Image (cartoon, rainbow, N blue to C red):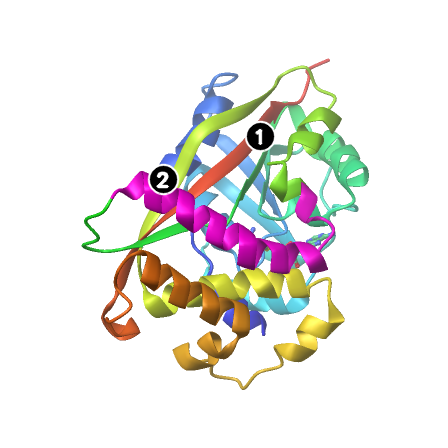
Amino acid sequence: MTEKFCKYRPTYPENVCQVVIDYMKKRSEATFDLMLDVGCGGGHSSISFAPYFKAVIAIDADECKINEAKARNSAENITYKVGRAEELDVQDKSVDLVLSACAVHFFKISAFLNEVERVLKPGGCLALLGYLVPVAVPRGFKGDIQTRRGQFMKLTQDLLSSEIRERWVEFQHVADKYQTILETIQWPKKTRVKDLSMKFEWSSEQLTGFFYSLILVASCNSKRYAEVFSLKSQVTTSDLQNHDVISIMMKEMKKLCGVAHIQDEELRFSVTFDLFMLLSEKTEF
Ligand SMILES: C[S@@+](CC[C@H](N)C(=O)[O-])C[C@H]1O[C@@H](n2cnc3c(N)ncnc32)[C@H](O)[C@@H]1O
């Protein structure tokens, strides 16, 4: 299951990493020593930010994910290890950036923030980022993207999001784009980054695989889903599409975009994620 989850998660492009680094540079021109990636999963966030730091410690509560991260996204300056967000095995005041990408909504927020306060250097930064379900448009689609975007958002809201929401109470943090978490952060220097997105060109398999990984995320909190998805070791596009919600969504999306007659294998999608990001700087005393 972990292998399937990790295979379809995206890495974060330079424009996203640069927003965090620019925020950090406002307080210091020095090079950065240490980043801590909390809830690193398969290491996609760790590998994306690693070039900006001398060293990265990346932790996840799930040992299988740590093993996947080592296999998929290793780099000389990254140390992957099992650990929990609420009890960070890191020295006091040693970290320049604590990053958590698509993960903070799983944590016990106040225990995690206490730990962040402890491990960050004075003036160090916290970056929390996440995204909602992306909008996918088939390549070559000539219609009105804005209208399609609205229809697609409604479709995913109606199908995928409600499917996830039903099984995952923490989804509220994602639905409110971390607003409640922003209000919980006590440091005066905190901000929400607006208008941030990332775009990819994906095959049909990549897109269905990503949707499937979202359902797997929900399955972290649902035994029933873990059972439903105890699939074979190799997942094919047709396995993925045999799942009701994903299958319905892909079919509806193809209809919406007027490409229902085209075989999945021939389709390429332009996929846009709207990101939400909170940045905060630990107060220096
Ligand atoms: C959706 S994945 C995000 C992975 C990666 N950061 C990315 O951007 O692709 C969320 C991860 O948070 C981890 N996680 C959940 N609760 C945790 C906790 N309390 N402490 C550490 N990791 C946790 C899960 O095991 C999972 O790998």
Q: Which mark is residue 119?
A: none
Could you classify mark 2 by the number of other residues whose Cα lies within 10 Å: few (under 14), some (14-19), or many (20 or more)? few
Residue 22 point in image, percent of width and height? 43, 24
Query: Is residue 166 located in the magenta-colored stretch of the structure?
Result: yes
Name the kind of residue labelled 2 in the image: Glu
Give the quadrant of residue 229. bottom right
Within-10-Å neighbours for mark 1: few <14, some 14–19, many 20+:
many
Nearer to us: label 2 or label 1 = 1
Q: Is the residue marked 1 within 8 Å of ligand 1, measured from its CB?
A: no
**Which element type, helix, strand or loop, lies under badge 2?**
helix
Q: Measure how far apart labels 2 and 1 are at the Cα level.
A: 17 Å
Please tell me how many numbered marks the rendered image carries: 2
Residue sitting at x 58%, y 70% = 2
Q: What kind of secondary structure does the magenta stretch mostly adopt?
A: helix
Residue 14: image tag: 2
Q: Is residue 90 magenta?
A: no
Q: Report the quarter where the C terminus lies.
A: top right
Query: Could you tell me which residue is drawn at 26 percent across and 60 percent down?
Result: 258
User: Which badge, 2 or 1, comes first in the chain's sequence?
Assistant: 2
Q: Amino acid at mark 1?
A: Leu
- Residue occupying image coordinates x 46% and y 71%: 247
Q: Considering the image in quadrants, where does the N terminus appear?
A: bottom right
Q: Position of residue 168 (x, y in %)?
A: 71, 56
Res 264 → quadrant: bottom left
Q: Start and end of the magenta stretch?
A: 144-172
| Snapshot quadrant of residue 119 | top right
Give the camera-side residue of 112 and 242. 242
The residue tagged with tag 1: helix, strand or loop?
A: strand
